[in-house]
Structures are given as C-alpha cells and as structure tokens.
Amino acid sequence: MADNDLKASIVVDNQTLSFEVPPVNHQGTVMVPMRPVFEALHTSVTWNEEDQSITAEKEGTSVQLSLGSPFAYINKGAVVLSSIPYVSNGSTMVPVRFIAEVFGAKVSWNTVDRRVTIIMASSGIGGRGQDSLNPLPQNSATSNATFVPSELRVQFVPSQNAGILEAKAKPLEKMLKEQLGVPVKLSVSTDYNNVIRLMKAKTVDLSFLPPYQYVTAHDNFKTADVLLQALRYGVDAPTGKTTQQLVDFYQGMLLVRADSPIQSIEDLKGKTIGWQGMTSAAGYVYPGLALGMNGIDPVRDVKGQFFQGHDRAVQGLLNNRVDAAAVFQDIRSLMQKDYPNVIRDTRVLAFTNKIPNDTISVRSDMDPKWREKIQDAFISIGSNPEGKKIIHEVFGHEGYTFSEDNKFEIVREATRYMNAD
C-alpha cells in the first residue's frame, strides 16, 4: 500500500491519543509519532542524537530503534521491523503494533471504525534486571539444600583437545581455591550425559552445562540448578561486527538473498531452507521454532537441505541452492575475507528468540550460602585480566552474570515444539 493518512484513532486503555502528525499506513504498517505512544504506555524515552536512536524503557523491558534501520533491539536482542522508523514533519514515526506489544499490550485494528485499540497488560512487564537476580534452590526445599563442600569438584566437557584445555584450566583451580577457601578439583569428561550422571550421583558438584543439557539435568534428573550464565560480546545487527557490550545470549537468524521476493517468514512456505544438524540451536531448533510460531511447519511445509557448517549454508544461499539459510548471528562477518560482499548480497529475514549462553550449574542440594560464594567467585575471576584470559581460552567466555531457571523457558518451548510429532 502507498503511504496515506489513516484518519484513524489510536486508543490506549480507553484514552484516545492526539497527534500533531497523523498516523500513516506505511506499506501495510500503521506508523505513529513515537512520543505520544511511548508516554501513553508510561515508558521513559531517550533520544540519542549521535546515532539517531530512540530507547524506551519500562519495568525491566527496553526497546531501541534507529532512524533508517530495519533492526530494533528488545533487551539487547535483535529483531527485524516490518517498517523502518523515519521522520515526518518533525516527528519520528514508529510502528505502533511493534511498540505496544513489546511492552506487553494487546493490539487490535477495527476496520469499520478505523481504530487501533491498545490494551495494556494488567500485570508487571518484563522481569528483574539481570544484575539483581538472586536465584534460590529450584529442585529442593531450601531446608534440604544443605550440602557444604569440603572440596569443590568441577567437571566440564572440552570443545577442543581435552588434554590441552585441561592444562590451560588448571590455574582456575588455584583461583577458585583462593576465592572459596576450600580445595578445588577440576576434571574433564567426554560427554554431558556423563556429567549429569555424576552430578546425580553427587560425585560432581559443579559443571558448565549448555542450555539444553542444563534443562535436561534440572527437569528430568532433578540434579542441577543454574547459578550463572556466561557472557560474550554482542553483535551489531546492521554490520554483523562484534560490539563491546557483553550479553548472556546469542541468536540465530534466517537469511535470504538481498534480491529475494521473500519478505516474511510466512513467505517461506514451500521454499527450500538450508539447515544445520537437527540438534543445532541456531541452525535448526530455534529457527524451526520461529517458523512454527508463524504457522509454518519446519518439517512438512518447507524443503530442508542440511549443510555441515553455517558458512556452507550461506554459500548454498548465494549459489541459489536454497531460498533461505538458518545460521548463527553473524556468520557473515567471518566470511568477508572470501566473500567481501556477503552482507550486501544477503538480507536478514528474521532473528530467532534469544538463545541462552552456557550455564554454571551446581548440584541441587548445594547450600544457599555456598551458591552465593560460588557466584561471587566466578564473577570476580571473570572481572580480572588473568581470570578473564583463562576462561576465554578454555570456555570462550568473557565473564559471568547471575541467572535463574525461568530464563530457560525458551529452551523448553523450543525442545517441546521441535520434538513434537
């Protein structure tokens, strides 16, 4: 549709908003001046002149948009907008449905009355900030979580040569001993199933479990509780480059060719998608969930072609072997040496939900005070240069932040959906 004045009303909780610049139908998306809407939603709004961005915050939820950019960030996680923010007669125009739904409101459009109705959520929006989290035992009653280690037994599964990484991790034993005041024994395992089994047998006290393995240990075996999550550097959506901002998640993304007629996830029905293996979080599970949430069965409604390597899936996309590719954000920045125009020649169709970073989890009967001591110890180690170097070389982590079990609901949702027949 061409842009046109809607001559419509925007109603927030029975209050009709007034605008100096009228709402506009921009290619099928209702765009409205940002400030009246943000104020009606009771958010705090900040304008950054330097990068032409708008940030709105309310009760632990933040959204950032930039003029001329198709990307927005919800609590640091990237999303693709249906319409790009722009300036009209001095007012910054933003997509009203996107803004309202970010902050928990329900949005409806009445064609007859030409009215957008926004109903705010009655309960609190978002959650506590990550720095204020104070996780408690989740699998045991607090009175039963009484294990106090005289020696902390830590086990991890190395991603590379086990012998080399175990040697590199040895200084971590000394650092943890200094922080905790008890001996620390660090060992490696061949697989996560073995780690979970040993935690259940109470012969391992702490491990670095990926999200799926943590949920398995916590839900199925009642043997592990999350204390911390790893931090890694975020990714700038427009450029694909890493930022200096540390985040406790990463994302997958669905790519199409820049000139592709595919404009939405719904357009993928009947198309060919380049997947990674069926256990790949960013290359299959979470993109598959994104399809499912938009009414597309990732098995029956699309044709799948599996690649061994996210870069190979992008190559398949560029070579017209597939219509879209499911990859981690942003593999393209690692391909620019061989494919200088890869970002220009491809387009992000959608980002997945946030995929939690790896956990530091303890056995479920760990004493609450010891949980706090362990949290403080790892955060301290990740904050000093020597400790940061060790955890980066061994685990690929840049630091740690507090976590709690409810942050892994998205893992459970993805697992249920992708395992459903």
Image (spheres, rainbow, N blue to C red):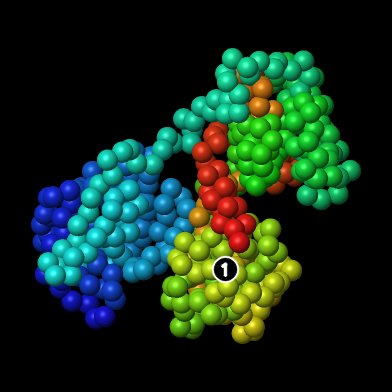
Where 91 falls versus 137 (above or below)?
A: below
Residue at position x 46%, y 30% in the image: 132
- Left or right, 63 with reference to 317: left
Q: Is residue 22 visible?
A: no
Secondary structure beneath disc 1? loop
Q: How would you rate the neighbour count of disc 1 (Cα within 10 Å): few for under 14, some for 14-19, many for 20 or more?
A: many
| Quarter of the rendering containing residue 386 | top right
Determine the residue located farthest toward the right in the rendered image. 163
- Left or right, 278 with reference to 418: right
Look at mark 1 in the image and give the residue it sits on: 298
Residue at position x 63%, y 42% in the image: 215
Residue at position x 33%, y 44% in the image: 57
Image coordinates of residue 191 in percent, x first then y, are 80, 45
Image coordinates of residue 346 in percent, x first then y, are 54, 76
Residue at position x 17%, y 48% in the image: 13
* Three-letter code, disc 1: Pro
Q: Quadrant of the image for the C terminus?
A: bottom right
Where 9 falls versus 231 (above or below)?
A: below
Image coordinates of residue 236 in percent, x first then y, are 50, 58
